[in-house]
Image (cartoon, coloured by chain):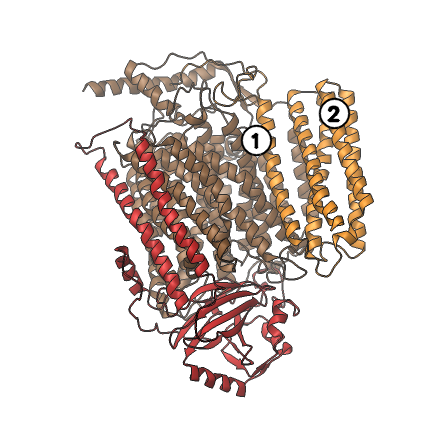
Amino acid sequence: MAAPAADAAFAGDPYHVGLEGQSGIATGHGEGGPASERVIVGYGFWLFLLSDIVMFSCFFAAYAVLQAATAGGPTGRELFNPGRVAAETACLLLSSFTCGMSAVATQFRSRRWTQASLFVTGLLGLAFLLLEASDFRDMAARGAGPDRSAFLSAFFALVGCHGLHVSAGLLWLGTMMAQVFVKGFRTDILHRLICFNLFWHTLDIIWVAIFTVVFLLGLGA
Amino acid sequence: MTGPMQPPPLRPGRFRCGHAAMAAAATLLAACSGGVWDARGPVAAADRQITLDALAIMLVIVVPTLAAALAFAWWYRAANPRARRLPDWVYSGRIELLVWSIPLLTIMFLGGVIWIGSHRLDPRQPIPSAAAPLEVQVVSLDWKWLFIYPAQGIAAVNQLVVPAGVPLHFSLTSASVMNMFFVPQLGSMIATMNGMVTQLYLQADGPGDYFGESTQFSGDGFSDMNFTLHAVPAEGFDRWVAQARADGPLLDRAAYELLARQSAHVRPYTYRGIDSTLFQAVATQQLPPAPGPQQGRGGPGVQPRAGE
Amino acid sequence: MFGKLTWNAIPWDQPIPLAAGMAVMLVLLGVVAWVVAKGHLPYLWREWITSVDHKRIGVMYVLLGLVMLLRGFIDALMMRSQQALAFQAPGYLPPEHYDQVFTAHGTIMIFFAAMPIIIGLMNFVVPLQLGVRDVAFPTLNSTSFWLTATGALLVNISLVVGEFARTGWIPYPPLSELAYSPGVGVDYYLWSLLISGVGTLMTGINFATTILKIRAPGMRYTRMPMFTWTVLASVLLIVAAFPVLTATLAMLALDRYLGFHFFTNAAGGNMMMFVNLIWAWGHPEVYILVLPAFGVFSEIFSTFSGKPLFGYRSMVIATMSICLISFTVWLHHFFTMGAGGDVNAVFGIATSLIAVATGVKVYNWIFTMYGGTIRFATPMLWALGFVVTFVIGGVTGVLVAVPPADFQLHNSLFLVAHFHNVIIGAVLFAGFAGITFWFPKAFGFRLHEGWGKAVFWVGLAGFYAVFMPLYVAGLLGMPRRLQHYDLALWRPWVLAAGVGIVVMLAGAVCQVIQLVVSIRQRRELRDEIGDPWDGRSLEWATSSPPPAFNFAVLPQVRGADPYWQIKRRAIETQQLSGEPDYQAIALPRNSPTGFITAFFATLAGFALIWHIWWLMAAGLVAAYAVFVWFAWRDVDEKVVPADEVARIDRDARRARARWLERNAAGGKA
């Protein structure tokens, strides 16, 4: 009973829900039929990032609520190390830049520069993580671990959750480098690189919020 | 442990029977003697009034709506040759306007009721009265109620004796987990939480024994967190205070710590004297929160069973 | 080696959970043994377990939901019978067991019965209604399902190994903190919900992407069927609300595992924050469940009245405004915590605003029937039962949204009756209605009508027999979750509810009989052309059951109710539309990724519950390995050749042509 439809060639569209090759028309808005795979993957990943931001916002809210609940323990002002936070921030912002460079290199289909930029991104991410870990260790050594007060619980959970995301990002980055090395710039690999870029930049945005809400306001208080 | 209570004799409902729907509500009310609508104090009466008003407002549109739903369904059944079929009738501006405005107007009206009611019946609102309110400090424990009378210098467990016709001002906190303090026939319930103090005003209009309970599940002994509120005439209250002062243990911090351990089925008793800073110490966490179960192992037997 | 896990974890001293757990295990083992012995395992593995077809996944979701519905119903039977016996007596369930039963009942019914049934219907129906071949991310879809199954499995393991939470299904701290709940019960709760919550979130992302980006040509927003619209609203709520649940439960887990102080009594923890956060998820959750239920009923009212839905735009606006307002009402779950008049009033009014949008929907359904030609098939009966029941539940809901009324009714059996009134009346009725409605599409034969009507009438009577007495008990001041009670005042109503649930049990028996009878009579009940109810949307345009690729060519949508138009045209011209030019179709390949991921997630979850750290680490590493292995695939599609597509579609067209002839002959006669 299906009505005759101007059907399209399906090449390169793995799920064949789309009309690849007509992506100019296929906006997904019901006019030209399903959107292209690139749009679908990117869109889905955006939604994931939004949901991740909602999750972070809960930790931010908890931090805002518990900020004053130091239970007689140390406050942020006494604990935070401006120099190290600045170094962490610099690492992460730079890594975002290099990550952006990798996207440019991918645009030009340069495997060498893509890999190099990704590698530097990974190194900077790793440096950030090591700095953060030593920060955490120092605080714990001073008796200011997450079990000391509700304020510190909220601090470690918020900053630690970001740290976990960076760690997961590093695992992903390593996997992507291996995939680019083995499989080259296949369509699906390109889509994954786009998603990875989005992810990494989102972590940066969240860090900027942490930097402002936790460290700047904490040190200024 | 409070014994089984006989429902107090039904008094005629005192609400105004303006609405037709009130008749139906009155039938329900009759079935509810001893319940939240068998009000024995101004707060419960006002709570009930607002509930019934809101119910009446809604029933005015809900009853015709349900009748229309069933009537349309039956009239337009496929087997009815007299029904006029309109297979393409899908839009009517007038009806759209109607279906939005009827619920909206109802809810606006109800919104007014909600706004006024929330403010007038805020549990912290004192009850206007010539008599000064009786102060009672309430601590919910695992799994019993502690009532402290700071002005009288006495305290009672699982038993609340108050003068009838006098406003009661409760300050409430919890020694451990959250509970909710509720005397159904006197009105509004309120939560008790550790490290926080909530406020509640109630009043019993006449003498009587009223069932009190926790409505917030608080663990294995929850089912026994009941008490009786005895509203007595003023002289009876004084007599009870004098009796309590004459006898019973002293509620100091050591006695409190013993009391704070988990136990259920606690028979009502009184303390002849109190540490007057005790309530503040619990509410501000100067006294540490009450302990949970004293032993543990993996598995369902991890907490001592209620009542052990 | 095994963390906190010892032989003591198995409740040897408690015959009821032990026997129940053993029975469940025996049944499971029996089923597995039967499957293996009969040689069905390869078939199951190939066609179901590794399937990424949205139709198969939808069926598995519904099946999981129904099995867990039965489990939750058994819990309900235990609760009602315990309370019936426990008047001035201990009853047969001690508190530490009874507390687990009501906690498990709530958790299972919301997360593992209602959610899977609703998500199952979404899975099966939405791509068909959109006129496309699958969802945006089919393998992710399969993973979502298997992670939900992991959560359900963990909850059931708690029957035999250890205990389940004894806190109520919303585990308020500090009761749920280590200090007051040192056992593993809350940990079972946390990890089963955290793991299945990831699955639900991915479902949300998947379906939001699907509906917003993958639709048949011409399927504009204003042409989407109402069910798809409500699913869109529901999945947007999932994307926005489930991360809140994840974060909140993660905080509680940090408190319990690493000594954090988010919600503890000590060191500045704030239990009010848990209450706020969890209801910021919890109230939207109600609409995640109920909006698709509204969608199901919209389809049914329209189909069985033989009319398009009345006031389509109003319905869309009402749906989307519920979607928004549902985030602004969470405080009505705790009016009695002393927030003050202003706050209570604002949230009370916001809550009743939802009733406006809901009221509009009810009126539109009523006007859909106006002027229609109504057939009282089973789905339509459920729809009418829903309208009556749901409106009653709505009235009591608006009552408890009035703060002074809530001050007397909160946490009472009145409240329990209210939310069962709306959740059973809307979600469960929609489940049964939707299953009856789309069953022929999924399996190619209809469910038995007579037994279906029996399920409806007996179930409806049982529902009222259980919950009307509970309303009264609540008005008499009886709180929820009592293991025993001493007030004679409450007893008659508790006993009445106990009798009521026996009627409900009879309804459940009718349901089982209906399934058995329908399967035995499947030849007589066959749906040959794929349109058993004279349907209107695109799922009826394909055969029953649909081919793996759903549509031989993507349908061209030219208006609302597209299949109705196609059908009218065919009847008017007395011929089917011209045969399309068949081309090869590539479909996503089966993948065991979801199943294997869920297997390791189960291991990791169990290890976390029992503090078996090496197993947890192993589970996580293995899960990552699966991820990489999946990412390494080179071929992710299989091609159905054009001949095959043509053969399948020509069969379907022949059936339709026969129907058209019969229809014409019938018209002349």
Residue occupied by mark 2? A102
Q: Is residue A16 above or below residue C406?
A: above
Measured from the top left, where is residue C606 in percent x and y? 62, 49
Chain of the residue under label 1: C
Amino acid, disc 1: Thr
- Quick one: B67 or C569, which is closer to the camera? B67
**Marks 1 and 2, Cα distance to the nearest angstrom?**
28 Å
Residue ID at (48%, 38%): C234
Between C550 and C306, which is closer to the camera in this rendering? Answer: C306
Colour displayed for chain A in the image of the structure:
orange
* Chain drawn red in the picture: B
The residue positioned 33% from the left and 60% from the top of the image is: C496
Instruction: Pick the quarter of the image with the C terminus of chain C.
Output: top left
Where is mark 1, residue-wise?
Answer: C139
| Badge nearest the viewer, 1 or 2 | 2
Report how many numbered discs are placed on residues in the image. 2
Viewer can see residue C493: yes
The local secondary structure at tag 2 comes to helix
The amino acid pointed to by label 2 is: Ser
